[in-house]
Image (spheres, helix red, strand yellow):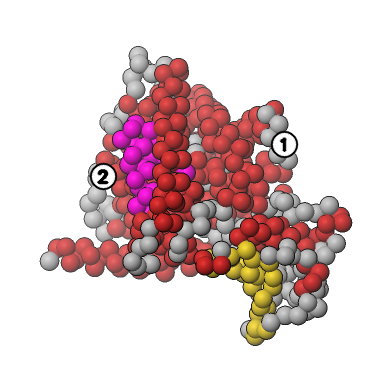
């Protein structure tokens, strides 16, 4: 009977959480805040359902993060983020190190906490949250390279921060030297990368050649492969998070059977993981104990948002330029600094020292909880305004070219859905003037709720929905051409606009 009650309560929570996503979507808030709110209502501060196990929260949180990273990798378009990966890798390594050191040094000086606790706090807060970034930034009209940096960074920086927090939480002052710390971190990252780069291609090869008896088995097999990568890396003392993200990225960009169903299944699994993880973390927190953490949390969060994150972006950009990987404009740097969203990852990481029995770790958890709530409320809804203020917004970029894709598997082709947004220079262009590559064609236009097959002289209008069929080989070229015309008009190529970013 008790099991039935818990199943009913769990189902009600999930349904309520799903309904609340619509509200969060309209306000621009990451859904995590709503889910954390459900947890607070259910926990000691609300209905009083007891949950006081940081060890269990850590284990469930780590598993949920693996699912979220798998979904992030499976739904990331490699062609969109490829040029952004070098800078994202620098941000996920050097940038993380800069953020940890800056937060630790400043917090130690201002709040007077000991050096080890300050380093743990800096490491806990160094990672941007994949779920928060994916849920907010994928709705923003950003240039592909800028959006790609933020997406790739959020998928890559979990691995080094988890390693750092685990090592710092288990290390003593006598054994923790910078050399051994860097060596262990490097080895774990290399093992995780090796496992991910091995399992991903092998899994893609196997799935293309094994005829599964039911289409519903393909998404399960793909997700299972990502956890083979995660578990294998952990058993080899490597980074499971890096392994699962790389495996998912490879699988998601391989031409596998039933890709659309796989993406849908992964998104559903990630949503369920987010709901469960955030509600559980909310139940672990106690509002009655938060008061002493408010002032330190606000001070630390301000240091993180206005000093540590901007410095990490500046140093990473300078290193990118020094390595001849390209310079990042000050506008992009400013937006990257403000868009470093923290979400459930820091809260999950804060359970690691708590579970390890580090002195003062419960207060650290409360402080991190305050930081995530306050600064997610502050940063999440203001990102669209920041993008417009800094001039990095790209109207007509995200919603018309971050397209819905359905694989036409037997034809090795994709069906792209493109919307002509207000302000786009696609308006007034005739279909033949798009000059799409020979492997792509506009096959249908939906206008004012009615669909028709266009001729070569059909003029596009604002709010038109276009269906473009393209071969897999020329999909990237077709998207670049549509992007260029959207920004530069039908003579985009003559003006040097190639739609590359």
Disc on res. 327: 1
Q: Position of residue 446 (x, y in %)?
A: 65, 80
Q: Residues within 10 Å of mark 2 (few under 14, many from 20)?
A: some
Q: Secondary structure at mark 1?
A: loop
What percent of the width, then of the height, locates residue 390? Answer: 72, 49
Name the residue that disc number 2 marks.
56
Magenta region's main secondary structure?
helix
* Residue 444 relative to residue 31: left or right: right
Residue 72 lies left or right of residue 139; in this view the side is left
Was residue 239 drawn as part of the magenta stretch in this picture? yes
Tell me the SS state at disc 2: helix
Residue at image point 70% right, 39% down: 328
Which circle, 2 or 1, is nearer the viewer? Answer: 1
Give the magenta part as a residue range. Answer: 223-246
Q: Is residue 226 left or right of residue 450?
A: left
Q: Quadrant of residue 454?
A: bottom right
Percent x, y of residue 58: 31, 42
Residue at 67% x, 40% y: name it. Answer: 333
Depth order, front residue of 370/71:
71
The stretch drawn in magenta includes residue 146: no
- Above or below, 206 against 466 in this view is above
Q: Which residue is at a point 71% across and 31% down the rendered structure image?
A: 324
Residue 281: percent from left, percent from top = 34, 49
Q: Residue furthest top?
A: 174
Q: State which tag comes first along the sequence, 2 or 1.
A: 2
Outermost residue toward the right in this view = 494
């Amino acid at each position: 009977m008790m099991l039935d009650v818990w199943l009913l309560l769990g189902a009600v929570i999930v349904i309520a959480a799903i309904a609340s996503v619509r509200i969060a979507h309209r306000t621009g808030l990451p859904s995590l805040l709503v889910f954390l709110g459900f947890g607070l209502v259910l926990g000691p501060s609300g209905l009083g359902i007891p949950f006081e196990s940081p060890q269990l929260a850590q284990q469930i949180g780590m598993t949920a993060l693996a699912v979220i990273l798998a979904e992030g990798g499976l739904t990331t378009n490699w062609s969109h983020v490829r040029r952004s990966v070098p800078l994202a890798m620098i941000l996920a390594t050097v940038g993380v190190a800069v953020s940890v050191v800056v937060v630790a040094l400043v917090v130690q000086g201002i709040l007077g906490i000991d050096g080890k606790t300050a380093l743990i706090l800096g490491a806990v807060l160094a990672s941007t949250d994949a779920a928060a970034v994916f849920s907010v930034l994928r709705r923003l009209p950003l240039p592909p390279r800028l959006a790609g940096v933020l997406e790739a960074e959020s998928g890559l920086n979990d691995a080094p921060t988890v390693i750092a927090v685990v090592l710092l939480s288990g290390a003593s002052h006598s054994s923790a030297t910078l050399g051994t710390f860097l060596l262990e971190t490097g080895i774990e990252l290399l093992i995780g990368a090796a496992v991910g780069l091995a399992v991903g291609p092998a899994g893609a090869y196997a799935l293309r050649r094994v005829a599964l008896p039911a289409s519903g088995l393909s998404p399960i097999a793909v997700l299972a492969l990502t956890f083979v990568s995660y578990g294998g890396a952990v058993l080899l003392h490597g980074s499971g998070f890096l392994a699962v993200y790389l495996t998912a990225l490879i699988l998601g960009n391989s031409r596998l059977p039933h890709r659309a169903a796989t993406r849908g299944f992964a998104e559903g699994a990630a949503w369920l993981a987010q709901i469960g993880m955030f509600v559980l973390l909310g139940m672990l927190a106690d509002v009655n104990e938060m008061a002493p953490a408010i002032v330190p949390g606000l001070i630390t969060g301000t240091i993180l948002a206005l000093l540590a994150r901007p410095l990490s972006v500046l140093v990473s950009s300078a290193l990118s330029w020094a390595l001849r990987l390209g310079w990042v404009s000050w506008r992009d740097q400013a937006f990257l600094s403000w868009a470093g969203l923290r979400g459930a990852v820091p809260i999950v990481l804060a359970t690691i020292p708590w579970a390890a029995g580090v002195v003062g770790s419960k207060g650290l958890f409360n402080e991190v909880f305050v930081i995530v709530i306050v600064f997610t409320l502050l940063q999440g809804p203001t990102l669209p305004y920041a993008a417009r203020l800094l001039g990095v917004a790209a109207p007509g970029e995200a919603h018309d070219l971050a397209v819905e894709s359905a694989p036409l598997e037997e034809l090795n082709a994709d069906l792209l859905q493109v919307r002509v947004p207000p302000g786009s220079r696609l308006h007034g262009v005739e279909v033949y003037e798009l000059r799409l590559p020979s492997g792509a064609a506009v096959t249908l236009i939906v206008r004012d709720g009615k669909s028709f097959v266009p001729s070569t002289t059909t003029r596009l209008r604002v709010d038109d929905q276009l269906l473009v069929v393209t071969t897999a080989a020329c999909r990237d070229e077709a998207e670049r051409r549509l992007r260029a015309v959207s920004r530069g008009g039908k003579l985009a190529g003559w003006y040097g606009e190639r739609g590359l970013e």
